[in-house]
Amino acid sequence: MSTAVTTAESIHRRRHYLNADYGIRSWLLTTDHKRIALLYLFSITFFFALGGLFAVLIRLELLTPAGDMMTSDTYNKVFTMHGIMMVFFFLIPSVPATLGNFLIPMMIGARDLAFPKLNLASWYLFMVGGMFAMYSVVTGGIDTGWTFYTPFSTTYSNTKVIPAALGILIAGFSSIFTGLNFIVTVHRMRAPGLTWFRLPLFVWANYAASLIMVLGTPVLAITIVLVFLERAFHIGIFDPRLGGDPILFQHLFWFYSHPAVYIMILPSMGVMSELISAFSRKRIFGYTFVAFSSVAIAVFGFLVWGHHMFVSGQSVYAAMVFSILSYLVAIPSAVKVFNWTATLYKGSVSYQTPMLYAFGFLGLFTIGGLTGLFLAALGVDVHVTDTYFVVAHFHYIMVGGVIMGYLGGLHFWWPKITGRLYPEGWAKLSALVIFLGFNLTFFPQFVLGYLGMPRRYHAYPEEFQVLNVMSSAGASILAVGYLLPLFYLLWSMRYGPEAGPNPFDARGLEWQMASPPPTHNFEQVPIVSEEAYAYHTAQEVPVAG
């Protein structure tokens, strides 16, 4: 106890961004990128918990074949809100809005983002969007699915489509502003000597994701406005009875929503580059290829939306083109995985918690990526479209990959964020439980989908029950794995040992300042004179915690 008190006094005495000002007002009006990152951290944790609660209800319903816990209408609302909360209010903002906000200025030697007030406005827009989405829940819910397919969402659904869509529209502007802020910051505020090819790959990945945010999100915003116009004023855009075309909605929706997958996964890939380099004590193998592969993924991401529409009635020739392009997008992703693996080869690998999450990412992302190739194949896709095979695939990519990156990054930079170390044993246990729980939850769903169980059904034939019970049991384990970090990270904020400026002996400008960092990051503008990841010798990583 005396050690904890001494540690607390030591950190408290020093002036840093956490104790620079006190009171709720100082947080709600802050323009410090680090404090705004923490506002995002608490907000998205709340929305993640809400989305997780809906997931629990889904898995409880699917424990038995009869669908006897809730009606089909209620089930439609539950999985719709699960999707909306998780996709728009957790997965998309998770890494860029929290870790990106906190780290990018420090990684490039800047005191803040280019537009600090716009950064705060982005958080407020995010929260207002979230409130609208929650309003739709408490006033009856929405049953369209998170894809809002028309003409159901514009004509036939009697649920709260407009407030939910409005919430996503407002949150979309938050995403655009964040991406714009990152792009301008990286272009204009790099420290002297920090050339493009000395940038940390986390910055490259967030830069590429920001391009998608700025270029793709307006398409979603326009689509939502069109849905609103048709639903509220019966203007014929998507409804065939009014002279519209429902397929147009799918083109517009997936033109944004497929690149949105890369808004989610690219920042986590950036985290992987930092973790694998730091915990193998090596430069990233093929740095230039990894950097350019981020941009290539962003570009290809805009060209593959049609593979979501193989069964929509598009021409065979269009389907073939989208199939080929979908295979091509796998190449830059494979480049990253290959280079990370080559980096690990003959490295001095340390199996600390962030590295366990990196290994988890490699496993889950590889499974998700390979099964994505199945869906890019026309014949296979027709067989498994709208089955649980698709559910398993996108959860391995969007949830497994993103959360492994998010939690790995959160543990890696937690000592920098709070100045405290977390209990390493509990953290390793959590990483293991999450990995096992995730695979037990979603791997059986590949089999379910292959055998023909459709998604979005609340009742199913008895032959599918064993696999569904396995999936629900895995979800219970997964929930325990997610709850563990919530408790021990909160505990570490008060009782964790003092971390020091660089507990992992990592490279990068963010590790050259005290933990927690001072308000303005750098007293003097740093001058960069060496490449990123300058691990000159294969030395062992210090054990933190």
Image (cartoon, rainbow, N blue to C red):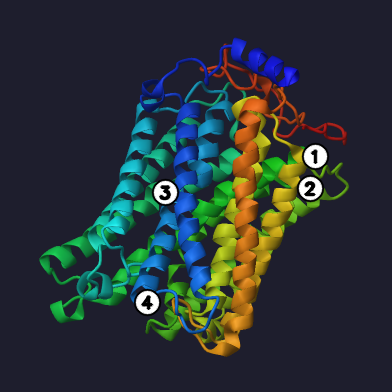
Q: Image quarter for residue 114?
A: top left
Q: State the CA–CA distance, disc 1 to disc 2.
A: 7 Å
Q: Position of residue 255 (x, y in %)?
A: 39, 63
Identify the image quadrant of the N terminus. Answer: top right
Task: Quickly name the residue at label 1.
Answer: 282
- Point out the tag, 4 or 3, that comes first from the N-terminus: 4
The amino acid type, in three-letter code, at marker 4 is Thr
Q: State the CA–CA distance, disc 4 to disc 1.
A: 55 Å
Q: Position of residue 282 (x, y in %)?
A: 80, 39
The label shown at residue 213 is 3
Q: State the CA–CA distance, disc 2 to disc 3.
A: 30 Å
The amino acid type, in three-letter code, at marker 3 is Met
- Point out the tag, 2 or 3, that comes first from the N-terminus: 3
Q: Position of residue 16 (x, y in %)?
A: 56, 16
The label shown at residue 71 is 4
The amino acid type, in three-letter code, at marker 2 is Thr
Asked whether the beta carbons under mark 4 and mark 3 sit within 8 Å of each other, the answer is: no
- Point out the tag, 4 or 2, that comes first from the N-terminus: 4
